[in-house]
Image (cartoon, coloured by chain):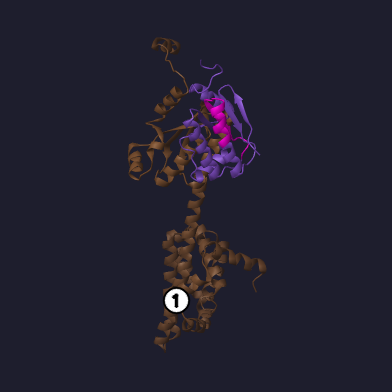
Amino acid sequence: MAEPGHARSNELLPREMEITDRDVTRRKEFLEFRSEDIEALTKLNEVAKKYADPVIEDLYRHFLAHEETRAFFHDPKMLERVKRLQKDYFLRLTQGEYGADYVANRLKIGTVHERINLAPTWYLGAYNFYLRAVAARLQEAFEKDPQAAFSSFLSLMKLVFFDIGLAMDTYIYAREMTMRKQQESIRELSTPVLQIRERLLLLPLIGVIDSQRARLVTDGLLRSIRANRAKVVVMDVTGVATIDSTVANHLLQTVTAARLMGASVIVTGLSPEVAQALVGLGIDMDKLNTAGDLQGGIEQAERLLGYRVIQDEPEAASAGAAF
Amino acid sequence: MPVPILKQGDILIASIQAALSDRDILQLQNDLSERVGSARSRGVVIDLSALDVLDSFATRTLRGIAYATRLRGAETVIVGIQPDVAFAMVQLGLTLEGVATALDLEEGIALLLRRGKGSNRRAR
């Protein structure tokens, strides 16, 4: 029944989210969802078909009666389409097939809801409504056998919690993807190497320095040293978010590599707290040539290169400013 | 194939053109050691600009050359390490610590002259 394209896209999401068959089995084991439950649910299918429309109507009446969920259904055509999809979902709960295809389908539904920004609270609230609506209908259908109604309901509850688990995973996964994209953007903030005097380069570091970024930074710096024939580099780390021992080691490697090309590096912008922390961590700070701040670093660099900076008399400056 | 060693005043210049075998680099160490003595050189520049890789044996031997020539009164400068080579070296922890480095031949010679380790006039 599923077209090849459809089947293929169904495989993608579980694999992307790293939800394996084994994982699915373990989830069901934890919920104690067994063949008896599958049997019980399949038996409910006829009842479900009878009650599907009224339950769905109730559900959407509930949505439209509350501000937070009403907002999603302003377009009547969209509302009809969604109700139809909802009915498919509802019936699928009692169709007896809860394997890879079912999982992929649930993940897709979760993804859609996350994308439209339906908060977990309302999503879970909707499930709650479902369970109560079905409980009432089961009571009706199994009037003569309340025990059967109750145990069928428990089976349904296991499956619904299985579904909720998958849906929540899609929310979490989506947030993780967003964070990863943001980190990528930060990483891509290009790290310029600026020549501020003959033979003197300035490397202002900003953001997160992970090993990938450290590599990019070092590579860029070494090529600039060659291109500009730099002898001194002032590397400012004021804008680096966290400097732990890993980052410190990256910086040390950058400094060492620059030295191999004949350039000495002055590190500026290490706060006293960070400096102390690094010493405490046993980082060999002797290898590092530092200056308190950027100004100090540039002045030190200029001295190393034999520059002398002379300031003109104050009168001359203000005379020029008058007009 | 032995590495050619050129003489410029008090300075010896060895330009390594291609990847050296362990034997070749040990040969270089011997040759430089001998030439520093016979030419009474006060500085050595080893140019690595033609290399795209430098292994740990070569790095250790270069340090050895620097220390040995220092014992004979000459300062050694390693020049011409390319960006990729420098990066690979630090990843492997090969830092050439204690050995002077410069960007290229010109800078290496300038460094030696600044340190008074070479002149075009012989001291009498």
Region of the chain picked out in magenta, as a range: B30-51
> Regarding mark 1 in the picture, which secondary structure is present there?
helix
- Front residue (pair A225, A298): A225
- Front residue (pair B34, A18): B34
Estimate the x, y position of residue A172 in percent, counting from the top left.
46, 59
Above or below, A314 against A244 in this view is above
Res. A189 in view = no
Q: Which chain is brown?
A: A
Residue drawn at x 45%, y 11% as measured from the top left: A320
Q: Chain of mark 1?
A: A
Above or below, B93 against A175 in this view is above
In this view, which residue lies farthest toward the bottom? Answer: A144
Res. A64 in view = yes
Estimate the x, y position of residue A251 in percent, counting from the top left.
45, 40
Estimate the x, y position of residue B108 in percent, counting from the top left.
55, 27
In the rendered image, residue B47 lying in the magenta stretch gets the answer yes
Estimate the x, y position of residue A14 in percent, counting from the top left.
54, 65
Q: Quadrant of the C terminus of chain A?
A: top left
In the rendered image, residue A243 lying in the magenta stretch gets the answer no
Report the amino acid beneath label 1: Glu
Residue drawn at x 67%, y 68% as measured from the top left: A4
Residue drawn at x 63%, y 66% as measured from the top left: A8
Q: Which chain is purple?
A: B
| Residue labelled with disc 1 | A29
- Front residue (pair A292, B1): B1
Above or below, B7 against B16 in this view is above
